[in-house]
Amino acid sequence: MYTLLLVIIYIAFISLGLPDSLLGSAWPVMHQSLDVPISYAGMITVVISIGTIVSSLLSDRLTKKFGTGLVTVLSVLLTAIALFGFSSTQSFSMLLIFSIPYGIGAGAVDAALNNYVALHYASRHMNWLHSFWGVGASISPYIMSYFLTGGRAYTEGYFFVSLIQIFVTFTLLVSLPLWKKPKGVATASTEHYEPITLKDTLKIKGVLFVLITFFGYCAIESTTGLWASSYLVEYRGLPADIAAKFASFFFIGITGGRFLAGFISDVVGDKHMIRYGSLIILLGVGLFMFDYSSHTMYMISLIIIGLGCAPIYPSIIHSTPVNFPKRYSQSIIGIQMASAYLGITVMPPLFGFIVSVSTIGFFPVYLLILTGFMLVFSEKLNQKLKLAS
C-alpha cells in the first residue's frame, strides 16, 4: 500500500508539470496564429495565476474536508478540461476563459500534495518527487516541438497533453482507497492541523520573508519558462521548433538537478540548498547574456539555470514544518503557494510590458534582478530564524 501510494504521488507530480511549460514553448507560434502581440502571453498567465492563488488559499479547508486524494483527482480533471479547451479554440478570449480552470486545478493540488510530502517524507523524497514534476515539464515542450516540427498545429500538442491528463485523472480516481488509510503512513486528512488567516500567518516570525523568497523563485522559474523560447526566436534568431526544444532543457536541468539533490539534501540541509541554487542560477543567467555562434551554449546556459532552480522550491516547502509550527503547515504552505503564484501573476506579464515598450533583449538582465531579489530575502529569512531560535 505504502509503495503503491508513493507511485501514485509520483504520477500526480508528473501531471502537475505537464501543463506548466506548454504555453512558453508554443507561444512563438501561438501569438502569430491568434494574431495577437507577443506580450499577450502575460495576460494568459495572469488569469491562470489568479485561479491558482484562489485555490491555494482555500487548499487547507478543501483538503481537510475532502482529503488529499479527492482534491488531487478533481484538480487534475480541471487541468485536462482546460487543456482540451486550449486545443479546440482559435480565439484569444476563449483561451482566457479556459485559463480559469487551468489555474484552479493547479493551486489546490499543489498545496495539498506538497504539505502531504513535507509532513511525511524526508527532504530527499521531496526533491525526487519534484524532479518528477520536472519530468512532466520537460516532456510537454518536446511534445509541442514534435507537432510544430511536423508542420502541424500547436492545438494538436495541447490535445495530446489533455489526453495524458485524462489518463492520469482515471489513474488517480481508482487509487482513492489508498489515500484513506495507507499502511504505515498517516494521511494528510488525519493529520492534526489548524487553518489560520493570512493576517495571523504574517505575524509568525519569518513568514513574510519566506513568502517573498517564494515569490521571487517562482517569478524566475515562470519567466524563464514563458519567455526563453521567445527570446531565442526574436532576439537570437533561432528557429521556433529549435527554441521550443531548448526551452525544455531548462526543465531538464530542473529535473536532473532535483534527482541529484535528493542524494545530498539531507546532508547539506534546506538552507544551504537554497543558497547554492541561487548562486548557480546567477552563473547560468550570466552565460545566457552573451551572443554565441553556436546554439549549443544557449542550451547549456538554460540547463545550468535549471540546475540552480532545482533544489529551491522543494527545499522551501520541506523546511516549512521545521521552520514554523507543524499544526499550521497546511495553511502556511497554501499561503506560500499563493505568494508563489502571485510572482507568476505579476512578473512574467511585467516583462511582457517591458517587451512591448522596449526589447526582449532585456530578458537575461531581468532574470538577474529577480535572482538577486530572491537571494537577499532568503538570507534575511535565515537571519530571522536564527535570532528567533
Image: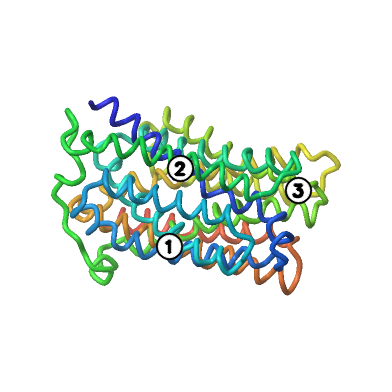
Is residue 343 placed above or below 181 in the rendered structure?
A: below
- Above or below, comparing residue 380 to residue 198 in the picture: above
Circle 2 residue: 165
Q: Is residue 125 visible?
A: yes
Residue at 28% across / 25% down in the picture? 3
Q: Is residue 322 visible?
A: no
Q: Residue at x 46, y 33 (%)?
A: 261
Earlier-in-chain disc, 3 versus 2? 2
Residue type of the residue flagged with mark 3 = Ala
Q: Is residue 388 left or right of residue 271?
A: left
The location of residue 213, given as percent across then percent down, is 44, 58
Location of residue 81 with respect to 253 vertically, above or below: below
Residue on which disc 3 sits: 240
- Between circles 1 and 3, the one closer to the viewer is 3
Q: 140 or 166, which lies in front?
A: 166
Evaluate if marks 1 and 3 touch, with contact meaning CB atoms under 8 Å apart: no
As measured in the structure, the alpha-carbon distance from the residue carrying label 3 to the one carrying label 2 is 26 Å
**Label located before the other in sequence (2 or 1):** 2
Q: Residues within 10 Å of mark 2 (few under 14, many from 20)?
A: many
Q: Marks 2 and 1: CB-CB under 8 Å?
A: no
Looking at the rendered structure, the secondary structure element under dot 1 is helix
